[in-house]
Amino acid sequence: MIVELINTGSELMLGRTLNTHQQWLCRRMADLGWPVSRQVAIADTGPEIQQAVRESLGRADLILVTGGLGPTSDDITRELIADLVNKPLRENPAIVAELKRFFAERNRPMPARNLVQAQVPEGAVVLPNPNGTAPGLAIKIEDGSWKMEDGGAGRLQSSTPNPPTAQWIVMLPGPPRELRPMFTDTVVPLLQCELPRQIFVCHTLRTSGIGESALAEIIDGPLQAFIARGLELGYCARPGQVDVRLVARIPQAEALVLDAERIITPLLSRYVYASDDEDLEAVIVRELTARKQTLAIAESCTGGCIAHRITNVPGASAILIAGLVTYANAAKEKFAGVRPETLAAHGAVSEPVAREMAEGARQATGADFALAVTGIAGPSGGTPEKPVGTVFMAVSSAAGTVAVKQLNRFDRETFKDVAAQQVLGMLRRAMV
Ligand code: AMP
Ligand code: MG
């Protein structure tokens, strides 16, 4: 089963709109077991759209097309695709009635041009749009024929060994708040009914505190036997974290992936904090809640970023006692209990200060764990001994205080994100 995605919209090509459909639809399709094999984004001009759809028809069993179903002159996807697959457009009375109702409900006259949204290619399935005026459309092409570039009829030359007998084109509206519910409520049931089932299992282990190549050195060897049996191994490195992806598309895929996961999880136990979508902060809140333990945070250069992430998790109030943003030296002394001598001897960005911040925050709040971060975000303020990007972090608990130094040479915002990720990773490791 070959699935392709075509995102239309000149705003995408001009950098005015982030193509969120690409990520959202690819993720949904992968979770459903039909990963997308190719995606293109194109301007919404006639030749571009027809060429992209024609190319996809030569390869794919399912083509998802987004955008261009609106009522304005740049919304031409429906007409172009109907023409390409030789399906005449007919006005659909049910959609006309729905459009009239939509405008009447809002006490607005219906512009005549909205009627174009009631045009349906012959035989197409209409996908209702409760959140807008443009219904989606699904066209089944039974005979593999569509218009070639020269105007003649083409036949499907599928590159799949056992191609499904029909091809599908599914057209979805551009606005995400219309596309997403339509996909979930009507496209998924349609695909599940019409498309052959496919085996696709994908598990992701999320790690922090280890680099991509060091991680590969640990697991590449032990996974060789699984790779020989059909396991696909992938890495995705991001600042402060690396995801390990285990994929299988063979019969017994689930067992193969689970066995592989069972082999590498103990090898990576210090670093793995979650499987699949859970964030580090969610894991921390969940585990501290289960242990009935609490947390305090003393931040300097991260400016509240860590407290923000923790408080994004529902139920954080069960574990978070306080998040202090002690930016000035005086605040570090007054609220985090850092001694003036320590500041004078080592400077605010130093390991002793990070340690005292963590210990002071723990003492002041009575929390079981406290973490602290102090560093130089830049772009100025660096010195030869402490260049921009230098950051010290500490985690304090009944077991003692651990501190590390990192060098994170990023822009200010990324610097904060990475430091937050690193110290949350340290906390997680201090908890195991
Ligand atoms: P449409 O009328 O179908 O072309 O859709 C127009 C609206 O949907 C605009 O607000 C676009 O910015 C938005 N939109 C279209 N395509 C995308 C996309 N790929 N990702 C995010 N938003 C999009
Ligand atoms: Mg558009």
Image (cartoon, rainbow, N blue to C red):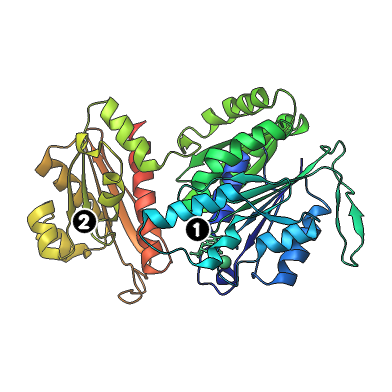
**Quadrant assignment, res 249:** top right
**Quadrant assignment, res 143:** top right
Q: Nearer the viewer, residue 165 or 370?
A: 165
Q: Is residue 66 left or right of residue 132?
A: right
Q: In x, y percent, where is residue 386? A: 34, 68
Residue 385 makes an appearance in the image: yes
Q: Nearer the viewer, residue 65 or 372?
A: 65
Ligand 1 within 8 angstroms of badge 1 C-beta:
yes
Residue closest to the far bottom: 380
Graded by Cα atoms within 10 Å as few (under 14), some (14 to 19) or many (20 or more), the crowding at tag 2 reads many
Secondary structure type for disc 2? helix
Q: In terms of sequence position, does the residue under pointer 2 or pointer 1 come before the other? A: 1
> Which of the numbered marks, if any, corresponds to residue 151?
none
> Which of the numbered marks, if any, corresponds to residue 175?
1
- Quadrant in which the N terminus is drawn: top right
Which residue is labeled 2 in the image?
353
Q: In x, y percent, where is residue 204? A: 55, 38
Q: What amino acid is found at the position of numbered circle 1 in the picture?
A: Pro
- Quadrant in which the C terminus is drawn: top left
